[in-house]
Image (cartoon, rainbow, N blue to C red):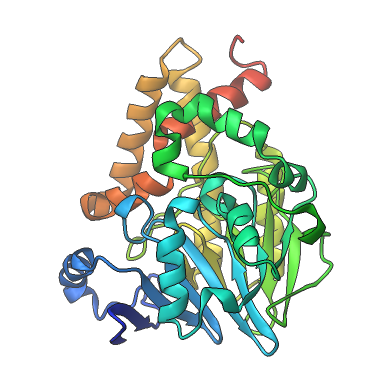
Amino acid sequence: MVRVVVDNMVVTTIVPDKSGSCTGSPARQSEKRMQELDRMDDQPRVTEVADGIFAIDTLFQGQQGSVAAYLVVGPDGLGLVETGPSTVSTALAAGVTAAGYAIDDITDIVVTHIHLDHAGALGGLMQQLEHVQAWVHPVGLPHMVNPEKLVNSASRIYGERMEQLWGEIIPAPEDRLHATEHRVPIIVGGRMLVPFDTPGHASHHIALLDEQTGSLFTGDVAGVRVQGTSLAIPPMPPPDIDLDAWNRSIDLMLEIAPQRIMLTHFGSFTDVETHLAMVRDGIEAQMSIGREVLVPGGTDEEMTERLEAWVRQRLGNDAEAAWGALDAANPLFMGALGIRRVLRKAGELEA
């Protein structure tokens, strides 16, 4: 690992550890100390995870290792995969600077889906950067141009925390926003990325393959995993979880056979088959918990508690160190709501 400071920003060059994580940490015996040091940093960390691809830690809710955006350096420009919400825009710009560029250098943006932790700042960035072209799944595109329904849906869940979590949500200019097509390459920062429709977590979800490095940007369809841990968890928020589609998307990612997967939550992992098997198993495990708790009449609070117990048991000794980042990336009360909705749609739970 090489750890240097550029303009008070921490820049880390990393190698995968035995668990498949690209953590930037040395041998496992010193991981705990490195985690303690990292928690002392109050600036975004920038990690070169593949040739010309930088992961920017946006410090969502002040948590390191929770929400990433990826800078893609090409011969003719600078691409961004994911924007995060507008509440992290300052950290995002600082991360771009730390990587040796300026936010104004960005020429192209693509988001894996329109959930606010992935795309909330898209409209604002496009307004700020009038030259930028952007891509999104066709189902999500109208909601980026007119985010009223998206905001209303989120407001019903988050209430008065909307501003604190997501900040301002600005419509994206329709004339510079483009719909992706399954397996039809797009040029992001002068670099070819291939989008794949990957529904399951959301109907408007894509994954993107950088064939140059074998890196697959997976948004949420490949789950959530804190660096330094070996547990991948599928996030299951409402409203449109589709279990069959999710399993087909996992099959597709295995078929693509990337060298590494790039999670928005969080970072790069090389143990692709093992990781995706955990995601598939996690979907079934969470649904089983839902049937045990919700079908007999349990509350969402009880379901959340059971999900937390399941995650903590799976994480073992890593639970306390990982919990802050994990809770910011995948609040389990959202999973309880999403699983309840799946069971209702399947007719296993009364409406």
In this rendering, would 350 be left or right of 42? right
Quarter the C terminus occupies: top right
Residue 337 position, x and y percent, is 50, 26
Please tell me which residue is depicted at 55% across the width and 45% down the height of the picture: 116
The image shows residue 144, relative to residue 133, as above or below, that is above
Please tell me which residue is depicted at 33% across the width and 47% down the height of the picture: 314
Query: From where the camera sits, is residue 20 visible?
Result: no
Residue 8 position, x and y percent, is 27, 79
Residue sitting nearer the eye, 164 or 269: 164
- Quarter holding residue 309: top left
- Quarter holding residue 218: bottom right
The total number of labels drawn is 0
Query: From where the camera sits, is residue 324 visible?
Result: yes
Residue 322 position, x and y percent, is 28, 54
The image shows residue 268, relative to residue 233, as above or below, that is below
In this rendering, would 325 be left or right of 67? left
Please tell me which residue is depicted at 68% across the width and 66% down the height of the picture: 130
Residue sitting nearer the eye, 129 or 326: 129
Residue sitting nearer the eye, 97 or 319: 97
Residue 170 position, x and y percent, is 61, 47
Please tell me which residue is depicted at 75% across the width and 52% down the height of the picture: 137
In this rendering, would 1 be left or right of 245? left
The image shows residue 272, relative to residue 63, as above or below, that is below
Quarter the N terminus occupies: bottom left
